[in-house]
Structure formats: structure tokens, C-alpha cells
């Protein structure tokens, strides 16, 4: 059986892999290369769909880096997601005594349940400006992957 073809990633494959998402300047956003590899099943939402698509058809043992155009990995930036929030709303969603600084990621309860997070851009006495875009929206990214096993 030494001439068997390596297993190839399919839409429902079970993978063990190392992966790294980094900005184009090489700053790691998430990486498993320094620790244990990740184990995941495709189609379960554990990786962004666009990243899963890149893996389809790759043979086991592949080590490859993809460059993603701005907005491909986490969508384009949406200016409508930059919103004013009243200080009262911020306080309602905060731990007592929270001391926020511009650039902080703040978690909010969404109407109808669920959570969403925004990055604080401006902190005023009455209102605050939050950016609810994904922090990586509109950014070009590098996606490095090393496929250890494919089932």
C-alpha cells in the first residue's frame, strides 16, 4: 500500500492541522504552531467558511500559506456598524466599576438574546462611539496551514 494517494480534504473532512492567521506584516492573530494542533470538522463553523474553502482538495501533509485580499477573510468593513451607544447602555452592559479605554473590546447583550462585541473608539460623558465590525474586517490576511491528518 506504499503507493496509496494521500487523503484529500473534502467538505465534511475531519482534520488535524496547525494553522496561523496573521496580518500581512506577520503579526500572529491566532496560531496553533507553538502548541498542540487543532482538530476540527469542516462545515461546523469552527473555521470561517472562506478559510474552509481554501482547504478543500488539499492533500494530507500540505504546508501552505495563502494571502487573502482585504475583506475576504472576515468581510468588508461596514460603516453602518460604527454606532453611538449611550453611556447608560454601556453601563448596563458593564461590570460595576469598569474602567474603559479607547481600543477596548466591550461585550454587549443583543436585543432578543445573544452577545455582540464592539471596539470602543470614542468615550464621552453622554455617548460613546463603538465599532461593531469584526476587528479583522477589511484587513488583508495571511492564512498558513499544515495538514497533519485528514479523515
Image: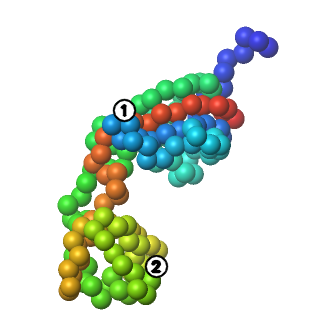
Vertical side of 44 occupied by 151: above or below: above
Quarter of the image with the N terminus is top right
Mark identifier at residue 22: none
- Nearest the viewer among 86 and 13 is 86
The image quadrant of residue 121 is bottom left
Q: How many marks?
A: 2
Quarter of the image with the C terminus is top right
Vertical side of 6 occupied by 53: above or below: below
- How far, Cα to Cα, is label 1 from label 2? 36 Å
Secondary structure at badge 2 equals loop
Residue depicted at x 32% and y 85%? 89
Question: What crowding class fits label 2: few (fewer than 14 Cα within 10 Å), some (14-19), or many (20 or more)?
Answer: few
Q: Are marks 1 and 2 in contact (CB under 8 Å)?
A: no
- Find residue 115 and report its horizontal and vertical position in percent: 44, 73
The image quadrant of residue 105 is bottom left
Which label sits in the foreground, 1 or 2? 1
Residue depicted at x 33% and y 37%? 25
Residue with the mark numbered 1 = 67
Vertical side of 78 occupied by 95: above or below: below
Residue depicted at x 44% and y 83%? 95
Question: Seen from this angle, which residue lies furthest right?
Answer: 1
Residue depicted at x 55% and y 51%? 46
Vertical side of 127 occupied by 51: above or below: above
- Find residue 49 and report its horizontal and vertical position in percent: 46, 46
The image quadrant of residue 32 is top right
Question: What crowding class fits label 1: few (fewer than 14 Cα within 10 Å), some (14-19), or many (20 or more)?
Answer: some
Of mark 1 and mark 2, the one earlier in the sequence is: 1
Residue with the mark numbered 2 = 113
Secondary structure at badge 1 equals strand
Amino acid at each position: 500500500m506504499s503507493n496509496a494517494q494521500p487523503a484529500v480534504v473534502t467538505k465534511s473532512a475531519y482534520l488535524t492541522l496547525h494553522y496561523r492567521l496573521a496580518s500581512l506584516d506577520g503579526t500572529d492573530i491566532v496560531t496553533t504552531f507553538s502548541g498542540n494542533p487543532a482538530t476540527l470538522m469542516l462545515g461546523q463553523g469552527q473555521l470561517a467558511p472562506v478559510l474552509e474553502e481554501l482547504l478543500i482538495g488539499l492533500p494530507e501533509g500540505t504546508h501552505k500559506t495563502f494571502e487573502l485580499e482585504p475583506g475576504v477573510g472576515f468581510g468588508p468593513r461596514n460603516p453602518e456598524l460604527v454606532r453611538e451607544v449611550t453611556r447608560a447602555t454601556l453601563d448596563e452592559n458593564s461590570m460595576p466599576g469598569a474602567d474603559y479605554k479607547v481600543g477596548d473590546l466591550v461585550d454587549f447583550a443583543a436585543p432578543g438574546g445573544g452577545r455582540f462585541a464592539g471596539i470602543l473608539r470614542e468615550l464621552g460623558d453622554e455617548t460613546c462611539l463603538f465599532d461593531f465590525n469584526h476587528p479583522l474586517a477589511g484587513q488583508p490576511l495571511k492564512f498558513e496551514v499544515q495538514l497533519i491528518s485528514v479523515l
